[in-house]
Image (cartoon, rainbow, N blue to C red):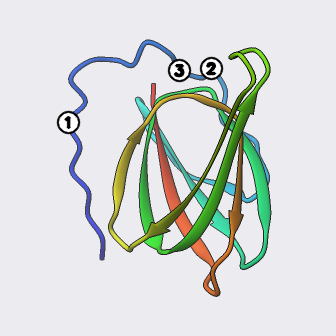
Amino acid sequence: MLCIDVEVLKQPPISAAIPLVAPNHELIKTRDKIRVYKLTINPEESIEVTYPFFYISVVLIGGNLQSHLSSAAAGNLDLSWTSRLEKGDVYWKEPVTGLKQKNIGENTVVIYIAEWR
């Protein structure tokens, strides 16, 4: 069992009116002010996603992710990084457009994405 207690002090300035529909994402819980998605990325699998909301990610099954973010609108921004995710890691994240992620590990990576509205 994995329990996360989060205190959100005010409503995020950006939220999505409708649920996220994206590859590898499954909507698993909907409540008045929150939606929770289960993101699953198999070994050597790549996804590209846009999160138009603030969110918390909670790692259920860890692994190695290679991430890439680029944007011509932001002065040819081009960033790449590798992350080692461990079970129980929790991150507060801001909205992002065109985030590419590839599972470069041997395990399937599973992350809960909790969207506050």
Q: In which quarter of the view is residue 45 placed?
A: bottom right
Query: Residue 11 placed where, x, y %?
Result: 34, 17
Give the alpha-carbon distance from disc 1 to disc 2, as whole Å.
Answer: 22 Å
Q: As rendered, which of 95 and 6 lies closer to the eye?
A: 95
Tag 1 and tag 2, C-beta contact below 8 Å: no
Q: Position of residue 14 (x, y in %)?
A: 50, 16
Circles 2 and 3: CB atoms closer than 8 Å: yes
Name the residue carrying label 1: 7
Report how far apart the C-alphas of labels 2 and 3 lie in the structure.
Answer: 7 Å
Secondary-structure class at tag 3 = loop
Q: Amino acid at mark 1?
A: Glu
Q: Nearer the viewer, mark 1 or mark 2?
A: 1
The residue beneath circle 3 is: 15
Q: Say few, some or many: other residues with alpha carbon within 10 Å of mark 1 (under 14 / 14 to 19 / 20 or more).
A: few
Determine the secondary structure under disc 2.
loop
In this picture, is 108 found above or below 9? below
Q: In which quadrant of the rendered image does the C terminus lie? A: top left
Query: Could you tell me which residue is drawn at 47 percent across and 69 percent down?
Result: 84
Classify 22 as above or below 51. below
Task: Give the mark, 3 or 1, whose residue is nearer the N terminus.
Answer: 1
Q: What residue type is disc 2 on?
A: Ala
> At x 61% / y 84%, what residue is drawn?
107
Query: Which one is in front, 41 or 76?
Result: 76
Query: Quick check: 59 left or right of 88?
Result: right
Q: Amino acid at mark 3?
A: Ser
Q: Is residue 89 left or right of residue 85?
A: left
Residue at 71% of width from left, 16% of height from top? 75
Q: Image check: 48 left or right of 25? A: right
Per the image, the residue denoted by label 2 is 17
Discs 2/3, front: 3
Q: CA distance from mark 3 to mark 1?
A: 17 Å
